[in-house]
Image (tube, helix red, strand yellow):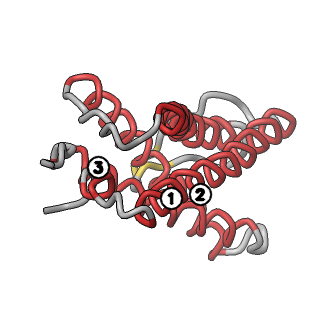
């Protein structure tokens, strides 16, 4: 049986985003415990914002690519229930890939700190407002937890199919 694969573009964007998202989650957990006002915390927050905005651009690129190209259908070996679960998980992953950077950027807009995208200052959308900052920080943190849960579900699905020797599913989104 011939494997219907994703395009090289889709594969590159998928794995680049996967690596960056995992790095961002680790960075987010680490930096939140750093002392407020420290140089290290400032450095990590600045880096986190730039990578987050890069991920937002990649998510837009990924969505556009998904709309203009054809994704291979899941093979018949995948049950209808698992196909529905995969579709729902993917849709929710896309949603979180947008909620995360948007909520982070909006949260940052309600602080005294500026947001820079790889050194380029971005506009502030609001004045300092601790209550709104807290609201969007909570949205950012809760959506991060949702993203982690969805990533675990996604990876568990991959492992499940690998254990069943259904390796062609993994090969669809791998290089080569």
Real-space Cα separation, disc 3 to disc 1, in angstroms:
17 Å
Q: Name the residue under label 3.
A: 13
How many neighbours does mark 2 have within 10 angstroms: few (below 14), some (14-19), or many (20 or more)? few
Q: Which mark is residue 155?
A: 1
- Label 3 crowd (10 A; few <14 / some 14-19 / many >=20): some
**Mark 2 vs mark 3, CA separation in Å:** 19 Å
Residue found 62% across the figure and 43% down from its top: 104
**Which residue corresponds to the image point at 64% horizontal and 35% vertical from the top-left?**
106
Q: Relative to 69, is 21 on the left or the right? A: right
Q: How many residues crowd mark 1 within 10 Å: few (<14), some (14–19), many (20+)?
A: few
Q: Can you tell which of label 2 and label 3 is closer to the viewer?
A: 2
Residue nearest the observer in this picture, 152 or 81: 81
Q: Which of marks 3 and 1 is nearer the N terminus?
A: 3
Instruction: Specify the quadrant of the image occupied by residue 118.
Output: bottom left
User: Which residue is disc 2 drawn over?
Assistant: 152
Residue 30's spot in the image, x, y percent? 67, 72
- For the residues bearing labels 1 and 2, Cβ distance under 8 angstroms: yes
Using the image, determine if residue 68 lies above or below residue 144: above
Q: Earlier in the sequence, mark 2 or mark 3?
A: 3
Extreme residue toward the right, this view: 131
Mark 3: secondary structure = helix
């Amino acid at each position: 049986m011939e494997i219907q694969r994703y395009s090289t573009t889709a594969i590159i964007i998928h794995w680049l985003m996967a690596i960056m998202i995992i790095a961002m989650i680790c960075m987010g957990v680490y930096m939140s415990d750093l002392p407020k006002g420290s140089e290290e915390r400032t450095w990590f927050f600045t880096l986190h914002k730039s990578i987050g905005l890069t991920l937002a651009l990649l998510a837009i690129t990924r969505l556009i690519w998904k709309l203009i190209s054809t994704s291979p259908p899941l093979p018949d070996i995948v049950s209808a229930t698992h196909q529905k679960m995969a579709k729902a998980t993917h849709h929710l992953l896309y949603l979180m890939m947008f909620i995360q950077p948007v909520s982070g950027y909006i949260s940052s807009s309600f602080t005294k700190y500026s947001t820079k995208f790889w050194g380029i200052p971005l506009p502030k959308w609001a004045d300092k407002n601790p209550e709104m900052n807290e609201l969007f920080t909570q949205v950012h943190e809760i959506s991060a937890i949702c993203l982690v849960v969805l990533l675990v579900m996604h990876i568990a699905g991959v492992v499940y199919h690998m254990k069943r020797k259904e390796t062609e599913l993994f090969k669809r989104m791998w290089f080569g």
